[in-house]
Image (tube, grey):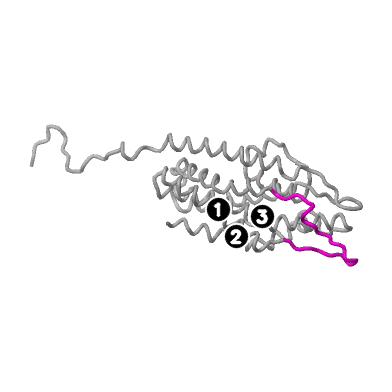
Amino acid sequence: MRVLWAIPVTALLAAVLLPLNDDFYLTWINFDPQGEGQQWEWRYNREIMRNTSGYLYGHLLALVTGAWSARRRRFPVALAIAAGMGAAMAAAAFLTAHALGGERLRVAADGRVLWEPTILGEVQHGPLLVAFPLYALLGAGLGVLLADRLGSRRTRVVAVVLLTIGWSVVSVVGLMQVGRIDFPAALLWMVPPLAAATAIGMASLSLGAGEIGPAFLGDWGDTASSALIIGLTAWTVVVTGAALARRPDPAAVRPEPRSRMWPGTPNR
């Protein structure tokens, strides 16, 4: 199947984005962490970001892969392919991120361990991984509903570019949530990419930079993780149902044979 290319590309995304995840805190949160509290916050954020590398753009790739499948297969078959591909892509992202990310202990000058993963929370990988097949199914439905509007190759390329730009902006906003949500919480249920990014951001930044040591705050991304699954499932059900209602049954549409004559037409 042509869509199998998405599996190695997902793994490649996780590997290629790893340096960006390493530098996310210094680029977007705090370019000069000072003191033990900020050092904890920086290192914890980096570990979470490394272990979820490729997840957010992997979701986008799953959406596009589902739409790709719907253009080349009957819709029920496309749904089955999308679900299987989404699950395989989730496995590829998880295994690659954990193989390359890992946990790296940091030791201070006096010998104290600065990073101790056993006493801290962790991002909820389950909802983020289940989102892969859900996005693929959603993409299959969108592929059917938008088939007329995305007929030309140029239109599809422009749509993917614009979607990637918007996806990137939303992801950065979600990843920057420092122990609190700075936008209406209802958006988490309506915009799945924002919920996924916020789940990671809240998980990595719920360990705040205290004056003396790390301060625990936030919900570790629990709310955003729930919103991701519930909101994305709702979108998938609605869009898939609309696509099933719109898609004609190929067995019910039988073209007229070319050799058939109109009634009353004389033979020649």
Figure quadrant of residue 245: top left
The image position of residue 15, as x and y in percent, is 62, 63
The image position of residue 119, as x and y in percent, is 79, 52
Check disc 3 and give the amino acid type: Thr
Cβ atoms under marks 2 and 1 closer than 8 Å: yes
Q: Name the residue at 55% across, 44% down.
A: 134
Q: Which residues are magenta?
A: 103-123
Q: Name the residue at 46% across, 40% down.
A: 145
Q: Residue 52: give its label.
A: 3
In this view, the residue in front, 151 or 39, is: 39
Relative to 58, is 44 on the left or the right? right
Q: CA distance from mark 2 to mark 1?
A: 10 Å
Check disc 1 and give the amino acid type: Leu
Q: Name the residue at 54% across, 47% down.
A: 133
Residue receiving disc 1: 61
Q: CA distance from mark 3 to mark 2?
A: 11 Å
Mark 3 or 2, closer to the camera: 3
Q: Residue 21: give its label.
A: none
Whichever of labels 1 and 3 marks the residue nearer the N terminus, that label is 3
Check disc 2 and give the amino acid type: Leu
Q: Secondary structure at mark 1?
A: helix
Residue receiving disc 2: 13
Q: For label 1, count other residues whose C-alpha is less than 10 Å away and answer few (under 14), some (14-19) or many (20+).
A: many
Query: Does residue 99 sit above or below 170 in this rendering?
Result: below
Q: Quadrant of the N terminus?
A: bottom left
In this view, the residue in front, 88 or 177, is: 88
Figure quadrant of residue 24: bottom right
Q: Main secondary structure of the magenta part?
A: loop
